[in-house]
Image (spheres, rainbow, N blue to C red):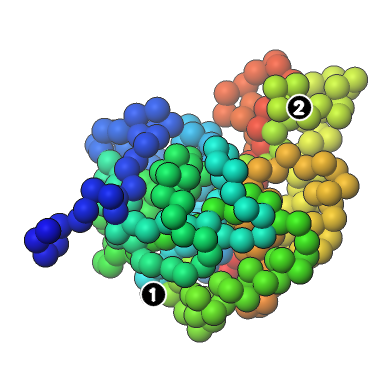
Amino acid sequence: MHWGEVSVHKVRHAGFAGSWYPDDAHDLEIFLAHALSQVQKPTVPNRFAILPHAGLAYSSRGIAPFFRHIPKQAEKLLILAPSHYANLPCDRFSTGDFAEYQTPLGPIPCFPTELGMKGNERALENEHALEMVLPFLALHNKQGEHRISVSAALISQILSKEAIDALVSLLLIELGEADLKEGKTLIIASSDFTHYGRRFGHAPYATLAPRLQMEKVKEHDLALSFLLAQGEVEKAFDFCTQHESTVCGIAPALIVSALARTLGSVGRVEQYYTSNDIYPSSEDEFVAYSTILWS
């Protein structure tokens, strides 16, 4: 293999382009630019986030605020995501070995990590929860003064609060506490919030009118969102257990919340909406999305 070439086995392909978001580079760039234009630029850059991962027709509204303003000094972005399709071990990260991630807007270089169990390339290839932010990052790299490299780790379930602390310590060691504090390394937790309705096996308010069901879900989702934003990790962990939460990326969310608290970052709930806000429906089935940012 010649210098500069990338082995096909080291490339993560854009498996959801053309279905979950546009695969035409021009169309995708217009779509992303519009999503970013709808965001009011914050006064401080974002360093950590909990972002949705549905198809970009739904999630772009929640992802765009993070990429609207990120630190100029950023060099790396780590995506922590749940695994929707592979059964992976609890309480540990699962990673793979890639040289780059492909997107319709060009490749994104990867940086290596030693975060956990390697050899999970197939799970990473198949996982939409890590792919939805990649087009935004590719656009940033295309338009920005410097490129940000990416890496990803999957974790679906955390069984104890002690495991959260252990995983945070691992991130601090592997990624470097100084780089995290200075905004050279950014972290995103990929998570949709409540999946509500019979299709998801979660309809605790079925006796209420659809509007009231949505209000109850919003009440609980915002309560959890504020706990995460404020770094109340233990309370958020207990909240999810008590409410039999269907927040699919709660494990990555808890980890990022705990890490942000450790580093003294200030969190805020940027926005909350549901799939019914994007495409209105009379059905009492929907998915909720919460965008939480730390500066």
Q: Quadrant of the N terminus?
A: bottom left
Q: Is residue 51 visible?
A: no
Which tag, 1 or 2, sits closer to the chain's start?
1
Front position in the image: 243 or 158: 158
Q: Could you say where residue 100 lies in the image, as x and y percent from the top left? A: 30, 55
Q: Mark 2 and mark 1 in contact (Cβ < 8 Å)?
A: no
Q: Is residue 127 left or right of residue 210?
A: left
Instruction: Say which amino acid is labelled 1.
Output: Gln
- The structure residue drawn at horizontal position 81% and vertical position 33%, both measured from the top left corner, is 215
Q: Is residue 224 visible?
A: yes
- On the image, numbered disc 2 is attached to which residue? 201
Farthest residue, direction right: 207
Front position in the image: 203 or 216: 203
- The structure residue drawn at horizontal position 76% and vertical position 69%, both measured from the top left corner, is 162
Q: Is residue 57 above or below residue 10?
A: above
* Quarter assignment of residue 5: bottom left
- On the image, numbered disc 1 is attached to which residue? 73
Q: Quadrant of the C terminus?
A: bottom right
Instruction: Say which amino acid is labelled 2.
Output: Gly
Closest to the camera, between mark 1 and mark 2, is 2
